[in-house]
Image (cartoon, coloured by chain):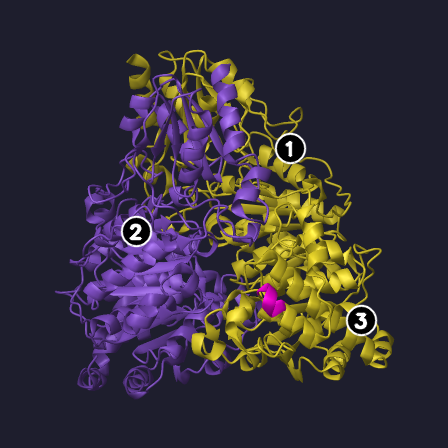
Chain colours: A purple, B yellow
Amino acid sequence: MEINQIEKVLSNKNELLSATNKCRGDILKMTTLAQSGHPGGSLSAIDMLYSIYLVANIDPKNPYNPDRDRIVISNGHISPAVYSTLGNLGFFDIDEAIATFRLAGSIFEGHIERSIPGVEWTTGNLGQGLSAACGMAVAGRVKGIQYDIFVVMGDGEHQKGQISEARRFAVKYNLKNITVFIDYNKLQISGDISRVMPQNIKDEYIADGWVVLEIDGHNFDEILNAIKMSKNIDRPTMVLARTTMGKNVSFMENIADYHGKPLTEGQLDEALKELGIENNLQYYKDIRSKFVADVSKHTFYRDDLKIDIGMSKIYNTDASLDNRTAFGNAITDIVQLNEDRIAVFDCDLASSVKTDKVEKEFPKNFFQSGIQEHHTATMAGAASVNGVVSVFADFGVFGVDETYNQQRLNDINHTNLKVVTTHVGIDVGEDGRTHQCLDYVGAMRNLYGFKVIVPADPNQTDKAVRFAVKEYGNFLIAMGRSKTPVLADEDGKPFYGENYKFEYGTGDILRDGSIPLITYGAMTLYALKVRELLSGKFDIAVLVFSTPLAPDMELLKRYSGKGVVFVYEDHNRFTGLGAILSQKICAEGAKVKVVTFGADYYPYSGKPADVLKLMGLDPSTVAHKIAENLSK
Amino acid sequence: MEINQIEKVLSNKNELLSATNKCRGDILKMTTLAQSGHPGGSLSAIDMLYSIYLVANIDPKNPYNPDRDRIVISNGHISPAVYSTLGNLGFFDIDEAIATFRLAGSIFEGHIERSIPGVEWTTGNLGQGLSAACGMAVAGRVKGIQYDIFVVMGDGEHQKGQISEARRFAVKYNLKNITVFIDYNKLQISGDISRVMPQNIKDEYIADGWVVLEIDGHNFDEILNAIKMSKNIDRPTMVLARTTMGKNVSFMENIADYHGKPLTEGQLDEALKELGIENNLQYYKDIRSKFVADVSKHTFYRDDLKIDIGMSKIYNTDASLDNRTAFGNAITDIVQLNEDRIAVFDCDLASSVKTDKVEKEFPKNFFQSGIQEHHTATMAGAASVNGVVSVFADFGVFGVDETYNQQRLNDINHTNLKVVTTHVGIDVGEDGRTHQCLDYVGAMRNLYGFKVIVPADPNQTDKAVRFAVKEYGNFLIAMGRSKTPVLADEDGKPFYGENYKFEYGTGDILRDGSIPLITYGAMTLYALKVRELLSGKFDIAVLVFSTPLAPDMELLKRYSGKGVVFVYEDHNRFTGLGAILSQKICAEGAKVKVVTFGADYYPYSGKPADVLKLMGLDPSTVAHKIAENLSK
């Protein structure tokens, strides 16, 4: 953002006045037309929103220019204000936006989506925007590109704790190119914010080390001067903009009900008269009635990022390490080869999740975010659509469970995030059930875009990590805590060695046989023991399905001839691989009995092998149950 | 807590000194014995922890006395400090705790569990304790019982945003009986807190309206006087206790590494010498080696709560309402009948989730928590094990997705929580994908204790709500947003009318036929349309499975004779009822084709019927696909 652009706009405020007045009309038209949406906050935010877009370094003709300024709208329900601003500034056809707002299939959805040029981040669930802005700032820093980031936020949403996490991060890393504008209209759905949840927003920012400016959010001089000032303040700046909900429509002003209620057609007519705008609703109604959904328009911009993943590291069968360390080694390699396009995020667990080597050797690529998982997940997601690949490494319960909705929102944003979780399943040491992530497959299965890889040994871990970093999209790579022997083939050579190439969706025949025991991750070792225990009696094949969301059904078919498959997993029995295979089998109408060994309840705290035994999941109990089953 | 009890303890500080010294020895012994655990923070917290338990109104002989003071340990990893305190105060056999710490099957788990007398809340994942304390305070207020609540927290965990939410709630409701003690040892796993994530903890509390006292956390005068003072302060009070990690063992002091690392046996010997304590490790080793796990000891205290659920309300077939309103009516009835034992929690959506009637008519039972879902979910859970039933009503994306881990932790705590979510599935109005909760079955399926009910119409909603409130345990009741006609039987009478009794796990034959179309919730209506469209060609039975986690397999068997069942759901297709049925079918080795109609990707924003059409989930497309399938 350039100061002289602000000066130019300041010298011609009448234009600003008339443009925002038109936007007000558009906001009211589109919400009345859709018979839903959020006009009240849109009218209170429009003056600053329009001003920011107008002076920011952002080009409607080239909206994905890497060095553009970023504008993040955290309160995504003010979509009418965003669409009217962007449309009137030439990012798209404003009439289409007005006419098709909230129609099924239109890109002009109820809450703003990143598929729209000029929208940097899909929001809707509140409290996410500042974290996303931090991700954009981090990405710029890694890439060595300078730009400004403006975040428009609601006041009510400041109740979300995630914002306090983001505030601290911004101060720690002195992300002084971030300026927050708060639409301080003092109303939320349930009424006055001071009645719903009293909060000293200003003091909270100051306590966290921000600079705070206070302005009238409808006064263009004050708005533009605040933007100008923020440019020269060497800390993150928050602009508390006092505004009026429903501003400039007399009967809407300060009425909380208009947070989420559109005007009737009669009220619209009255409002437009007040604004001095022609009522051409019929024109838009005609367009709306002819709308044909074209879902191919819902595309999400992707950076064309070339990642050098280097050469795989092969661990020999005498190596003694855990999968975490293999991940740590691989990611350190990769960061070294891609220093200007990768960011690694940690939440106070680097030495456990093995990103400490990156921290030490490549501190510019490493971001220590403290015990702030919600913020970090969102930040990592947003960074990953701003020119870097993001790697967020954490324990399973934090990277999957605690941040489940943040990962969902990342997924909706079509991010390029690699979540790497250690300490999944029962293999967490003695930390007990609060730390046992038993749903690393079952939770992620709800998120359409995420791919899940659960490597079986250090060699497969190395290859899976390199694969996932190179491939665009969201991945979860999940692993336990314990040391994991390097798996060998029948000749004693590394099974996932030189000739192995990781392919998403391909299962592996670790040991051949006629009765399939399917497994993945930490249980692979135990499955081999089951096979040993049954050898001579039953001819067990150990099949490794490391991509449980995309099981290798061809392989399964080859081995399910006897009508039964056994699944052995370090996971909730109701939502893991056994459940997934069953659904695929039933969808085809096949007859295959699936016997799943997995956790039926929250486990105990103890050494993994002891806990498995207590739960009837140790190799000898499982072998016994398989034998029993096969002897029926 | 009584002031004279403090005076008594103050007059005999030597006893306190010797007791905490013994605790220090116990802490070191148990962690060395277990070869894992968190000695560093246990030593920094023990002086205040022991002091609090000593003066609190809590009786080892009667640990569940309803008017006891509550002590919540938020940083559950200081379990060695908690066990040594409780054991030495007579809550259980201290030797058993030392000897069996972190052994699989022992109740003395890695992180503290509510199954242990004297432990009020299972923690481990950080940032939860203050929210739990608010729940206990709220429960006391509803019940009209006075008690004090002490919360021991770490400093590092203050990075979690949820704590800021809890702080605000405590001030809004002036929960002045809450006193927070922060173990301010300034170290977290990754080192100095000011380096990991700089934070002005004190200023943040002050900005939020708390009173802050600062003390030396190893000086008993200061600790006890702070407790005494907090009793007379008419606001929530935070005591910032400066402490030393590893306190009193010279070589451990201020070493971050001891956060999560036990001493070797040699180091232990040295440390015990410094403390003047006999090294009797062998004694405990002997007990440990003889330990036999008895999992029946893992029991969780339950209040014996009699809830009067009144009489069901019957809606006639000409009624025009949504399930939300039926819920709102039922819960208002129930609150009226149980004013001293029910709490209803809201996050700024009362008018949408229909708890606004409770807010208006029973304000003492209603808690408006603002846009603070993480805090609210935990608070509601904790209240529900302190003498009230908790009802937390919210949109699906907040009550399920955003608070997924909080619900998991509630479930681990064996709470008695009724989560009621509206706006699930595609039936959310035009708010779009950020607001579409498509995993209300699939996410909860990962949580072992939760039961899920998805009622099909207002009558079933009424009965399900009354059932869930009466039955102990965690429930999710999920419903859409739209008006839902009252379902009628073939005679036009209410299907879920006078003669209907809700039973968990029982499916309903809404319309008979020979080919089963199984559905639930908002899709029930659409399923009836499918049946209509196919009538004359195929004889479709519409079966309603309102408890998808416990599908009625007997009923399914009766209808699956033709080898195919169709499932129609407003849910992620990979994790809903279709997936559950498939797993049960495959577990039995049966041959039934399951054809599931559900969402294959994140939907669009628009009117539900339009969105369904765009996704090929409208009745006519579904009818067409069923016909095609049956004609093969």
Picture layout, residue A180 above or below residue A467:
below
* For discs 2 and 3, the disc positioned in front in the rendered view: 3
Are discs 2 and 3 less than 8 Å apart at CB? no
Label of residue B55 in the image: 3
Residue at image mark 2: A474
Q: Is residue B447 visible?
A: no
Asked if the magenta segment contains residue B266, the reply would be yes
Same subunit: marks 3 and 1: yes
For the N terminus of chain B, the quadrant is bottom right
Image x and y of residue A99, in percent: 25, 52
Amino acid identity at mark 2? Asn
The residues bearing labels 2 and 3 have C-alpha atoms spaced at a distance of 52 Å
Chain ID of residue with mark 2 = A
Q: Nearer the viewer, residue A259 or B406?
A: B406
The secondary structure type at the circle numbered 2 is: loop
Amino acid identity at mark 1? Ile
Amino acid identity at mark 3? Val
Q: Nearer the viewer, residue A484 or A107?
A: A484
Tell me if B8 is positioned left or right of B175 in this view.
right
Picture layout, residue B172 above or below residue B606:
below
